[in-house]
Amino acid sequence: MEAMYVSIEVLTTLGSFAGLLVAIVAGFGWTIRRTDAQLQHATGRLEARMDRIESRMDRLEGQTAALTHELTDVKITIARLEGPPPRLYTMR
């Protein structure tokens, strides 16, 4: 049997292909990790903003309830000042 030798050109091509494949896989991995980190950062900022908005909404709901109660009191007071509605007079 004759020994089979691989030429230096074939080895260089295979090495270049392997290096290129490793570089592409590493680039995709870096891109995915970076995108995940940015997404987590944006999600954290959004959650903080939503918490601030929810606290403002709770405060506004309390103010709205107080205003509704006060408006009801004003309506009752005006109704008492005006007196009962006039009754219909019947002809005899």
Image: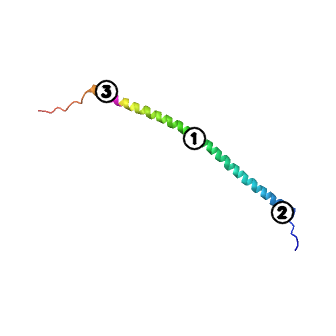
Q: Residue at the spot x=57%, y=40% of the render? A: 46
Crowding at mark 2 (Cα within 10 Å: few <14, some 14-19, many 20+): few
Q: Look at the image and give the residue range highlighted in magenta.
A: 72-77
In the rendering, at what x and y percent does residue 41 appear? 62, 42
Crowding at mark 3 (Cα within 10 Å: few <14, some 14-19, many 20+): few
In the rendering, at what x and y percent does residue 85 appear? 24, 30
First in sequence: mark 3 or mark 1?
A: 1
| Residue 5 relative to residue 17: left or right | right
First in sequence: mark 1 or mark 2?
A: 2
In the displayed structure, would residue 7 be above or below residue 59? below
Spatial CA distance of label 3 from label 2 is 99 Å
* Quarter of image, res 5: bottom right
In the displayed structure, would residue 42 be above or below residue 83? below
Q: Which residue is mark 3?
A: 77
Query: Does the segment drawn in magenta span residue 92?
Result: no
Q: Which residue is mark 1?
A: 46
Q: Residue at the spot x=84%, y=63% of the render? A: 10
Residue lying furthest left in this view? 92
